[in-house]
Image (cartoon, helix red, strand yellow):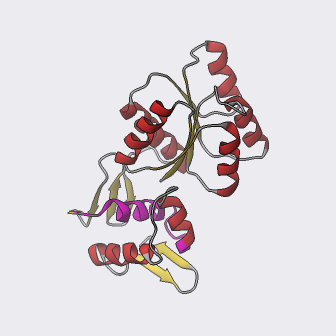
């Protein structure tokens, strides 16, 4: 799951990036409003973590612009500003959640998962498709009742496919959702992950749509 972190404090930004990566998220980190605008124009994100007090363009201005552009990406505001008026302004401006600094990284990860569940229309924490069960909190995968050991990248690819069972996703779409900036991506990395997932979970679970991409079977 790929997230955009917009935070100008280097210590906080690095801490959040490392902490969320340990929770299975891929994080792109920018430190000013203009860089955030460019990132949103060029990449696709599952969620944005947005500071308000940014150089070059404020978080509230970014939030307002994205919502005017009909960009519905979930946004959690992270800010040291704890005045009620600013919380109200951010939420009324289109933010989906608000977390004041300092915050606990475990709570932040839980809020991210909860927001992504709501966006997907799910109430339960586990994702179930046929005999496959994925727990986003523990990162555990079971198939036909048995625990399956997967690498972090294999889980990342599977998680993206689980978002939309039956939908065909291209190799490029999977790469963009699983890998962040600066991460080395081999030319056949996605194909290798798909091959390993099929070997561990069965050949029929993930289907190859020739010339288009891959889809998770719903049966």
Of 187 and 79, which appears nearest the observer?
Answer: 187
Residue 28's place in the image compared with 106, above or below, is below
For the question of whether residue 38 can be seen, the reply is yes
User: Residue at the location (38% across, 40% down)?
Assistant: 19
Of 13 and 22, which appears nearest the observer?
Answer: 13
- Screen quadrant of the C terminus: bottom left
Of 102 and 112, which appears nearest the observer?
Answer: 102
Of 47 and 132, which appears nearest the observer?
Answer: 47
Magenta span of residues = 148-171
x then y, percent, for residue 128: 38, 58
In the current view of this chain or complex, which residue is farthest to the right? Answer: 68
x then y, percent, for residue 91: 65, 27
Per the image, is 175 magenta? no
User: Residue at the location (79% across, 41% down)?
Assistant: 68
x then y, percent, for residue 92: 70, 27
x then y, percent, for residue 60: 70, 29
Q: Is residue 158 left or right of residue 43?
A: left
Residue 200's place in the image compared with 111, above or below, is below
Per the image, is 150 magenta? yes
Q: Is residue 3 left or right of residue 137?
A: right
Q: In this view, does 5 lie to the left or right of 69?
A: left
């Amino acid at each position: 799951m790929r997230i955009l972190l917009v935070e100008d404090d280097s210590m906080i930004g690095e801490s959040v990036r490392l902490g969320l990566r340990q929770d299975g998220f891929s994080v792109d980190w920018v430190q000013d409003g203009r860089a955030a605008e460019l990132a949103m124009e060029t990449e696709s994100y599952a969620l944005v973590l947005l500071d308000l007090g940014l150089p070059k363009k404020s978080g509230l201005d970014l939030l307002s612009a994205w919502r005017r552009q009909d960009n519905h990406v979930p946004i959690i505001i992270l800010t040291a500003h704890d005045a009620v008026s600013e919380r109200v302004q951010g939420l009324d401006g289109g933010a989906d959640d608000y977390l004041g600094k300092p915050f606990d990284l475990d709570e932040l990860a839980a809020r991210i998962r909860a927001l992504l569940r709501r966006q997907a229309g799910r109430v339960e924490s586990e994702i179930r498709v046929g005999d496959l069960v994925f727990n986003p909190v523990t990162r555990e995968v079971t198939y036909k009742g048995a625990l399956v050991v997967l690498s972090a990248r294999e889980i990342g690819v599977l998680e993206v496919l689980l978002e939309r069972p039956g939908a065909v996703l291209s190799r490029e779409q999977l790469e963009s959702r699983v890998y962040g900036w600066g991460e080395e991506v081999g030319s056949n990395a996605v194909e290798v992950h798909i091959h390993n997932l099929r070997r561990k979970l069965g050949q029929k679970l993930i289907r190859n749509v020739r010339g288009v991409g891959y889809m998770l079977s719903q049966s």
